Amino acid sequence: MRVLAIGCHPDDLEICCFGTLRKYIEQGADVYACHVSNGDQGHPLISPEELAKIRADEATKAGKTIGVKEVFHLDAPDMYANYYDEKILNELADIICLVRPDLLITHNDQDYHPDHIEVSKLVSKAAFLSGLPHRKTKYQMYQSFIPTFYMDTLAGVDFNPTHYVNISNQIELKLEALAKHQTQVKWMAEHDNIDFIDMVRTCSKYRGFQCGVDYAEGFRPHDVYQRHSTKHLLP
C-alpha cells in the first residue's frame, strides 16, 4: 500500500496523523509526506528566509523519525497557499503521479487556518490534474479519483470523526517526531504559554476516550463521488 499525506505547514501532519502514518509503516506500507507551505512566518524573531530552511529541515527529521520514505516541500509562503496557484497545483499533481498513492490524507475542508482550507482544496484539485492525459508533465498520468481522508483539526475543534485509528503503540514516536519542530515547540511555549507536546498528547488521549483506547487519531472521508473504496484503507 502507498499512502501520501499532504499538509499545509511543517508540523501539521505530525500533529494530526503521524501516529497513523507510523502504524501504516509498521504494517509494511510505503508512506510519503508533503508540506505545501514553508512555515516562514512561524517565528517572531527568525527571518522568513532562514526560518523556511530551518522548518524544512525539522520536517525532514520528523519524517525520518517515523520512517517516511520521502518528505516533499513545495515552499509556498505562509498565508499565500492558493488552490488557483498553477505552479503549486502542478507540483502537487506531479508528486501524486510520482507516488501513485492508494490513499490521500489531508486537511479538513473547514478549519481555523485559511491556509489549511486552501490546501484541502489544492489536494482535491491536484488529484484531478494527476489524471489528465494532456497535462504537461514528465510523469505518467495516474488517476483523478483517489480515496481521501480528512485528518483532525487543531485541538479537534468543530471536527467529528467517523473513523478512528488506535495509535496507543505509536504515540511516543509521534511525539518524538513532533519534538523535532523545535522552533514551534519553543515559540508556542514562549508566545502562547502552551506546552505543544502535552497539548497534542492530550488531544490524542481525548480521541482515544471516544473510541475506547488509550490514544487515537480521528478522520473522516472526503465523502463525494468516486472517492470511496471497497477496501478498508485506514490501518
Image (cartoon, helix red, strand yellow):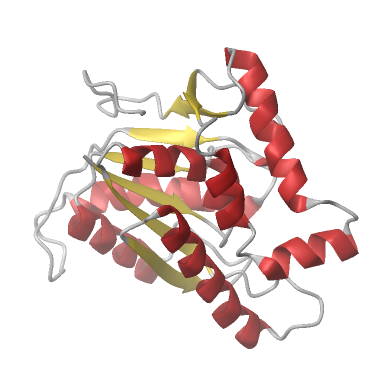
Q: Residue 161 in the image: x percent, y percent?
A: 55, 22
Q: Residue 115 in the image: x percent, y percent?
A: 59, 55
Q: In this view, does 44 lie to the left or right of 52?
A: right
Residue drawn at (53%, 38%), measured in percent from left and top? 109
Q: In this view, does 67 lie above or below 120?
A: below
Q: Is residue 4 left or right of residue 131?
A: right
**Front residue of 85 and 214:** 214
Residue drawn at (52%, 75%), measured in percent from left and top? 57
Looking at the rendered image, the quarter that the C terminus falls into is: top left
Question: Picture quarter containing residue 210?
Answer: top right
**Which residue is the extreme one toward the top?**
212
Q: How many marks?
A: 0
Q: Is residue 116 left or right of residue 25?
A: right
Question: Picture quarter containing residue 110?
Answer: top right
Q: Residue 200 in the image: x percent, y percent?
A: 69, 42
**Front residue of 90 and 38:** 38
Residue drawn at (63%, 38%), measured in percent from left and top? 153
Q: Residue 113 in the image: x percent, y percent?
A: 67, 50
Q: In this view, does 159 lie above or below 33?
A: above
Q: In this view, does 225 lie above or below 71?
A: above
Residue drawn at (22%, 21%), measured in percent from left and top? 231
**Front residue of 218 and 64:** 64
Looking at the rendered image, the quarter that the N terminus falls into is: top left
